[in-house]
Image (cartoon, rainbow, N blue to C red):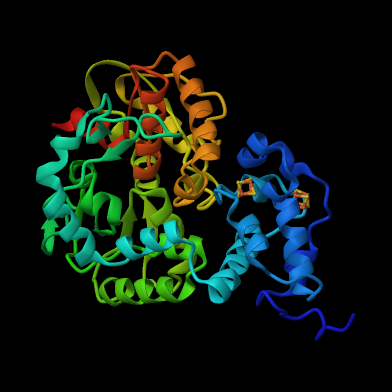
Amino acid sequence: MTEKERGKKILGINNEVIERCVRCGSCRTVCPVFNVTHEEPSVARGKIFLANMINQGKVELDKEAAEFFNLCTTCLRCAEICPVMVDYEKIIISARALAVEKFGLPPEKKAAVMLFSNRNLLETAGKITAPLTKLFTKSSKSPQNRLLLINVPRLGKVLLPEIKSKPFNDKDRWYRAKGAEKGKAVFFAGCMFNNFYTETAMNVVKVLNALGYSVFVPRDQHCCGAPAFFSGDLKTFEKMKEKNLKTLQKLDVDFVVTACATCGHILKKEYRELPYESRELIEVLFENIEEVGKWKFPKKIRVTWHHPCHIVRGQKIPRNYPLDVLKVVGNVEFTSLEEADNCCGMGGSFKLSHPEISREIQIKKAKNIEKTKSDAVLTECPGCVMNIAEGLERIDSSIQSFHIADLLVKCIE
Ligand code: SF4
Ligand code: SF4
């Protein structure tokens, strides 16, 4: 085969990327979706085979084939175990992008992309619905989350994060470091923090300030584009990226900090034009572990940790970082979690498009957490916080789910 023939074909990616798969099946042993369905199209090997056929023009990408490419949480466990290091994310996003070009976004993904890519729409929704929230929800065991008053058919208990009437980034603000300034950071909060978990967002800032970093929160920040990117709507993604880069590129700071695994993954991998480094909160905490070691939680607390997919595999942040950090905080007893790095089942809009499969993965996660007999499960992704909180409610667990910043802030106040 000539070099030209091996070049880009229908999916817009080089054949070699797809042909790398040796069909060993190792990905079947780790895929959370395959673990539920036990069907080949659920797993990377099946999808890559189909992508190869499409790329060679032997099979047409029809609606049924497009559906197979959506049957995936993009947890990247397959890519991590793959002996030949297949670039699975590239293949799945290219296949989804072709499907979106041909058929448009499926309704649930269209709704999610439309809401999250339009800041005004999200903020208006917050203004209108926030005062009415108590009419149709009740409080959940996990803070900043609410449970719908009625169980939804096929889903049972449904948990939602509290939407806020005023966004976290309502105007440009500097929050100054406590004591000597070690550096300046811009906080790219993302939609979940700006519009839902605003208290956690503030806690992230307080923790960074306590470590000696001044933090700038710009009003002009938009969704990082992850919902569009992972759905294959690359045009919308590029628009979001362009808008955010316009703000980020003109700032005189040392780094951009994220506290949402998916925002961090997208910024590190896709915002290559950033003039400074993108760092996840957990990386900053680990770098300052001596300082964190002086902190003490007000009372004894037993915690466990869930590794978000987009931190350990998306950003390849070592798994020991959060564990080492938690182990040095006074009054915190760390207990390990079985399959701590398995997906929580959320997978962005996967939860909406495949609710039954998503729920099975979620319940498995919640049951593993319940076995730890912890007071709380911590993580560093608002999506995981929410989905795990829902899973814990569904199995009637008393364990709370919250962000690591929510625990650390109590050590410094
Ligand atoms: S682990 Fe990698 S090489 Fe093996 S079947 Fe899966 S994608 Fe292909
Ligand atoms: S990304 Fe996760 S869900 Fe998707 S095929 Fe790979 S292991 Fe399965």
Q: Position of residue 191 (x, y in %)?
A: 28, 56
Q: Residue furthest bottom?
A: 4
Query: Residue visible at 79% across and 45% down?
Result: 25
Image position of 66 with respect to 304: above or below: below
Query: Residue visible at 67% across and 68% down?
Result: 62
Q: Is residue 318 left or right of residue 9?
A: left
Query: Residue visible at 58% across and 56% down?
Result: 70
Q: Position of residue 3 (x, y in %)?
A: 82, 83
Q: Position of residue 100 (x, y in %)?
A: 53, 71
Dividing the picture into quadrants, the one containing residue 38 is top right
Question: Could one spot residue 327 in this view of the protein?
Answer: no
Q: Nearer the viewer, residue 219 or 162?
A: 162
Question: Could one spot residue 376 in this view of the protein?
Answer: yes
Q: Nearer the viewer, residue 180 or 97?
A: 97
Q: Position of residue 339 (x, y in %)?
A: 57, 29
Q: Is residue 362 left or right of residue 19?
A: left
Picture quarter with the C terminus: top left
